[in-house]
Image (cartoon, helix red, strand yellow):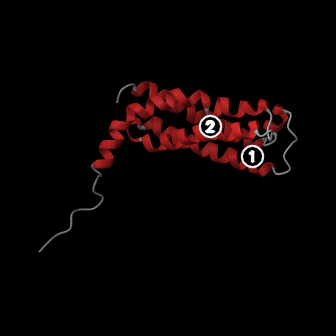
Amino acid sequence: MRRARLHRATFVAAGVYNILWGCYAVVDPQWFFRVTGMTESNTPQIFATLGMVLGLYGILYLEVARVPSRGWLIAAVGMTGKILGPLGLLWLIVTGTWPVDSVILVSTNDLMWWIPFGLYLKDAWPSFHHDFQTPERSSPPERTG
């Protein structure tokens, strides 16, 4: 695969970042509200749960780093979240639900990863497409006769 070392480094960084971010969100689920000047949440468990999910994404990103030729689907799901998250936040800002300062959430979690994830998806597509067309057999062929 083209640029395999770059992709490994990208997904190690993304994995470590997500695990650390997720752990911090679990330990201090009010940090985001304090930083943005928003009223602290009366349900911090929701933000802590988001941290747990993002931490689990980190584990998946480490798997992409381990075997870059087999990580297209994981990265595609991650990239989808990295596109939908900012769109959702944009809606919250435009409707006045959240302040513009809340952009900090997507700038480090999503926007900064668009180019390296997109490049990986482009480079890994041929392997994914090939594997999708020729799946491995998990059991021996049936015997006839």
Residue 49, placed above or below residue 115: below
Amino acid type assigned to the residue bearing label 1 in the image: Phe
Kindly identify which numbered label has been placed on residue 47.
1
In this view, the mark in front (1 or 2): 1
Label 2 amino acid? Asn
* Count of labels in the image: 2
Instruction: Locate residue 55, reporting x and y percent.
Output: 63, 43
Quadrant including the C terminus? bottom left
Spatial CA span between label 1 and label 2: 14 Å
Residue placed at 85% from the left, 35% from the top? 34
The local crowd at label 1, few if under 14, some if 14 to 19, many if 20 or more residues have their Cα within 10 Å, is: some
Residue 113 in which image quadrant: top right
Instruction: Identify which residue, 113 or 54, lies in the foreground.
Output: 113
Residue 92 x/y as whole percent: 74, 40
Q: Secondary structure at mark 2?
A: helix
60 sits left or right of 69 in the view: right
The label on residue 18 is 2
Measured from the top left, where is residue 72 in percent x and y? 43, 40
Give the position of the N terminus as an image quadrant: top left
Question: For this view, does 144 lie left or right of residue 53?
Answer: left
